Amino acid sequence: MKVLVTGGAGFVGSQLVAALIARGDAVRVLRRANSSLIALDGRPVEHAIGDILDVDAVVRAVAGCDLVFHVAALSSYWRARREQVYRVNVEGTRIVLDACVRAGVPRVVHTSSVAAIGIAQNGGPANEDIPFDPVSASFAYADSKHRAEAEVYRAIDRGLDAVIVNPAAVIGAGDHHLISSSAVIAFARRTAPAVPAGGMCVADVAAVAQGHLAAAERGRVGERYILGGENLTHRQLAEIIVGLAGRPIPRFTIPRWVLGPAAVAVDAFNRVSHRPPVVSGEQIRLSGIDFFFDSSKAVRELGYPLLPAAAAIEQAFVWYREHGYLA
């Protein structure tokens, strides 16, 4: 089978590429000319050079493919302008899907995010059916991924066979772009002296890759599938990481009411700083929320494996240590 992976040089994309190669597929990766190839680790893939905003490059990339995984996205939103987040995540998705419709690609798996689902208003873990909430809608990354899903539904109306997967906070070895796994570095190096009050759903990157394959094989057209794992408070997450690092556990939990003023201060600093932001005010505001999710639909329909968070965190920790990130 000829398979295209957009964003195949990224964290999740490269893990998916490895899984596809292992099962014997011929893999083509759409990547930018300046993309780091560290995550691909010399794997035998066909390289299609181009940007998902380049219509001609995308058309060439999808040509002759039996299956397309659209993984490419701008996930490090705090390092980019708001309008760029929307361009890549919404317009880029529209371009990829349009090319797939025109080429008659038999199956597409769109990688969304739990951010596009939002926060459950009843305080429990969110599932695929909750309404998109105002807090998430005000968050550019979440809103852009939600709008990208709308592009998927429009393409389905045009006849595309497509399914959506919604990974949670993906952690594991190889996250050299420092997205979700960057929390491991922060607590291991103790650059985070206190712990915010909220929490996250930790998804093992290996499980997420397998979830993509299962969605391609068994996912129902137009359905969303949360690819998550254990729901941990930030304190539980920190305790696992500092245990691996041999560091003391941060004593203080930052109360939610402090996070708003702290976010304002960070945004003000970032505006006058001449360096790329390490953290954004948006991240600080959101850190007090329990981003907990229910993966039972993916488990039931796809056979998605729920792997323990501690194993993924340890793999990320070991990889960062071996590659000099914790020095």
Image (tube, helix red, strand yellow):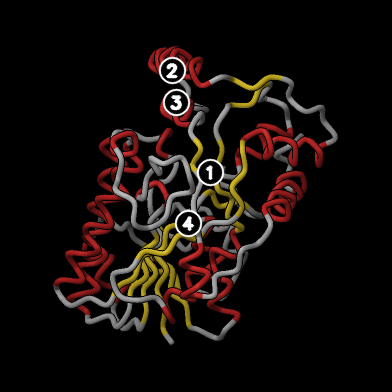
- Please give the label number shown on residue 285: 3
Farthest residue toward the front? 122
User: 10 Å neighbourhood of mark 2: few (<14), some, or many (≥20)?
Assistant: some
Residue that label 2 marks: 260
Mark 1 vs mark 4, foreground winner is 4
Disc 2/disc 4 C-alpha distance (Å): 27 Å
| Left or right: where 269 falls relative to 55 | right
**x, y percent for residue 219:** 39, 76
Q: Amino acid at mark 2?
A: Gly
Image quadrant where one finds the C terminus: top right
User: Height in image: 78 above or below 262?
Assistant: below
In the structure shown, which secondary structural element does the residue marked by tag 1 occupy? loop
Residue that label 1 marks: 179
N-terminal of the pair, mark 2 or mark 3, is: 2
N-terminal of the pair, mark 1 or mark 4, is: 4
Disc 4/disc 3 C-alpha distance (Å): 21 Å
